[in-house]
Image (tube, rainbow, N blue to C red):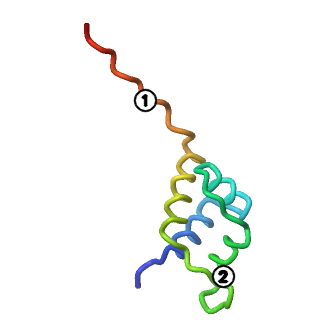
Amino acid sequence: MALTNNDIMKKLRVAHKLRDNDIVAICALVDFKVTKSEIGAIYRNPNHEKYMECGDQFLRNFLNGLIIHLRGPMPPKKKPEAES
């Protein structure tokens, strides 16, 4: 049985002790707008009528935001000096 994106989100939420507000803030770090109700729908039981499947775009943006949240933003790359 393979893990779904919803399962991955649930495991990350527990592992990092995240609340809905934290997830909204993490997504905002990568300019991805998400509401608390959308987050709640992702964590519902699949048999619930308001259940929403977590898409690849949501998971990708959340993971990118989580990297920034945990490590901080990437430092700017240094340009190589031109040889004269």
Q: Quadrant of the C terminus?
A: top left
- Relative height, residue 30 to residue 43 (above, below): above
Q: Quadrant of residue 1?
A: bottom left
Image location (x, y in percent) of residue 6? 55, 75
- Relative height, residue 52 to residue 70 (above, below): below
Q: Residue at x 59, y 72 (%)?
A: 10
Q: Residue at x 49, y 61 (%)?
A: 60
Q: Amino acid at mark 2?
A: Arg
Residue most toward the top?
A: 84
Image location (x, y in percent) of residue 68? 56, 46
Q: Quadrant of residue 82?
A: top left
User: For mark 1, what is the residue?
Assistant: 77
Label 1 secondary element:
loop
Label 2 secondary element:
loop
- Relative height, residue 20 to residue 84 (above, below): below
Image location (x, y in percent) of residue 31? 61, 51
Q: How many marks?
A: 2
User: For mark 2, what is the residue?
Assistant: 44
Relative placement, left or right, of 84 versus 28 is left
- Relative height, residue 82 to residue 68 (above, below): above
Dots 1 and 2: beta carbons under 8 Å? Answer: no
